Amino acid sequence: MIEKHLSSQFDSDLNSVCTQLMEMGGLVESQIKRAIHSLTNFSLSEINDVLDTEARVDQMEIEIDRALTAVVARRQPAARDLRLLLAISKITTNLERAGDEAYKIGKRIKSLVETGETRQMPIGDLRVATDLATDLIHRALDAFARLDVAAAISIYKEDDLIDCEFKGFTRKLITYMMEDPRTISSSLDLLFIAKAIERIGDHAKNISEFIIYIVHGTDVRHSKLKGIEDIVQ
C-alpha cells in the first residue's frame, strides 16, 4: 500500500499507523456484529461486551491521532504522504463514529432484552442491513489496505442498498405500530437501531471517499457518483 521512501524509519512509521488503523477497524467490525447477534440471541453478556468495547475503540482513536501527530512533526511529509496521513485521521474518525453507533445499538438492545418486548417483532429483518453494513466496513478497510479505487467506488454505490433496507424496515414498523399500539415503544427502539445501522453504512461510504482522495488527490465528499467516476477515469 505504501510507497518506499529513502528513510526506512518513515516507512516504519507509516506502516505502524496503518496497522493500528486496521486493528481499530477490525475491532469496530466485531463490535457491530456482536451487537446484532446479541439481539437475536437475547444475550445480555454479549451486549455488555459490546458496550465495554467502546472504551477501547475511543482509546485507539487517541493513540492513532497521537501517532499521526508524531509522524507529521518528525517527517514533515508532503504531497501523497500528507494526503495519506490526513485521510487516515479522517478514516479513524469515521471508524470511531461507527463504533459509537454500535454502542448506541447495544444500549437499545439491552433495554429491549431486559423487557422482552422484541420477541414478536421483525428482528430478523435487521440482520440483512447489518450484514450489508459490516460487509461495507470490512471491504472499505480492505480497499484502504490496497488503495483500491475501483473497490471504493463499488462501496460508494452499494450504500444505497442499506438505505433501501432502512426504508423498507421503517414501513414495516409503521404497520406494526398501526395494528398494535402496544408495540410502539419497542418499534421505536428498533427504528433507532435500524437508523444506527444505516449510519454505519454511511461511514463506510465516507471511508471510500478518502481512499479516492489518497490516490487521486481530489476531495470527492458531497460529490455525485458521476462526478467521482469522471475523476478516477
Image: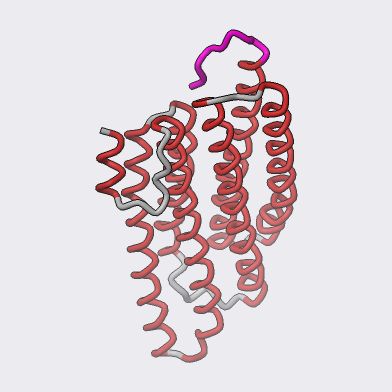
Instruction: Look at the picture and state if 80 lies above or below 153.
Output: above
145 to the left or right of 47: left
Examine the structure image and report whether residue 7 is included in the region drawn in magenta. yes
Comparing 230 with 34, the one in front is 230
Q: Residue at 58%, 46% (x, y): give it.
A: 95
Examine the structure image and report whether residue 169 is included in the region drawn in magenta. no
Q: Residue at 46%, 48% (x, y): give it.
A: 206
75 to the left or right of 175: right
Q: Residue at 68%, 36% (x, y): give it.
A: 64
Instruction: Look at the picture and state if 66 lies above or below 187.
Output: above
75 to the left or right of 118: right
Task: Specify the quadrant that holds the C terminus.
Answer: top left
Residue 11 spot, x, y in % from top left:
61, 16
Residue 122 spot, x, y in % from top left:
43, 71
Instruction: Look at the picture and state if 16 lies above or below 158.
Output: above
Comparing 41 with 33, the one in front is 33
How is the model colour-coded? secondary structure
Comparing 86 with 16, the one in front is 86
Q: Quadrant of residue 126?
A: bottom left
Instruction: Look at the picture and state if 94 lies above or below 4.
Output: below
Q: Residue at 55%, 55% (x, y): give it.
A: 37
Q: Which residues are magenta?
A: 1-9
Q: Quadrant of residue 213?
A: top left
Comparing 53 with 109, the one in front is 53
